[in-house]
Amino acid sequence: MTALSLAQRLADHVQHLLGDGPFPQPGGWTHMGAIICDASFHARCKYEATLRPRLLRLQTDWPDATTVRGFQRRLATEDLALAMNFNHPQKVATAHAITDLLTANGVDTRDDLHAWLGQQANRAVLRTVKGVGPKSIDYIGNLVGRSQVAVDVHLRTFAADAGVPDLRYEQLRAVYEEAAAILGHDQGGLEHAVWRYRSGAV
């Protein structure tokens, strides 16, 4: 089965279950501390119930962490696990590592990160952080408004239900991108609609 026929099969499944849209893009964050923590803590986490309230509280408690450098200054003197009420050493370490890498590369604001992720070489640099894979990079892109497809377990399950075989990450992302083109939807909006449907966030 060709990639185009797989995309058509997925598009038909989207239309059958989710209708014609429109599917708005996820809003993301403007607070860089929240963006970094969202990217670092979201895996295998009940987002709406567990992570989102913590990210909202972090923005209130650390208003000076709207930039990467502001967040880095907070991390130098305060315990992120305590601030997030989330005791997971590896996820905390990932947040610290992303912060240090972005600072070293001159990325300070949401707009900076949006532009920086447009370069494939920079995406490869970000992959060097432990805990950051291709899905995390696409996810971070969505958090700063790049409108990408971040393939997680929910999107894989949805595609499997549509009759799409188990594909490598990049292949399944391409199928979703083509399905969005077939349907005339924004890629990030389609991804978010599928995620909300499968995660029960609707």
Image (tube, helix red, strand yellow):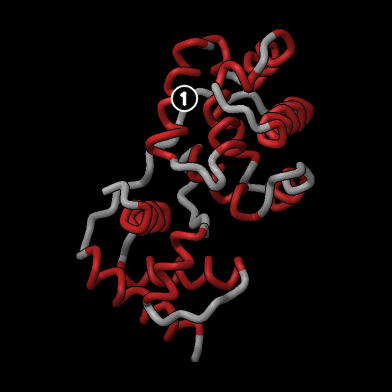
Q: Is residue 154 above or below residue 162?
A: above
In the displayed orientation, state which residue is furthest to the bottom. Answer: 1
Residue 107, percent across and down? Answer: 67, 28
Question: Residue at coordinates 37% horizontally, 77% vertically from top-left?
Answer: 162
Q: How many marks?
A: 1
Depicted 83 relative to depicted 101: above or below: above
Name the kind of residue labelled 1 in the image: Arg
Comparing 145 with 28, the one in front is 28
Q: Residues within 10 Å of mark 1 (few under 14, many from 20)?
A: many
For label 1, the residue is 54
Q: Quadrant of residue 10?
A: bottom left
Against 166, residue 57 (above or below) is above
State the SS at label 1: helix
Of 184 and 143, the residue lying toward us: 143
Regarding residue 88, the answer to whether it shows in the image is yes
> Looking at the image, which residue is at 53% across and 70% down?
172
Task: Give the percent coordinates (x, y) of residue 30.
Answer: 47, 26
For this rendering, which residue is in front, 180 or 72?
Answer: 72
In the depicted structure, whether residue 60 falls above or below residue 11: above
Would residue 193 appear left or right of 68 to someone viewing this image? left
Q: Nearer the viewer, residue 96 or 182?
A: 96
Residue 96 found in image quarter: top right
Residue at image coords 52%, 57% = 152
x and y, in percent, of residue 50 in the image: 44, 33
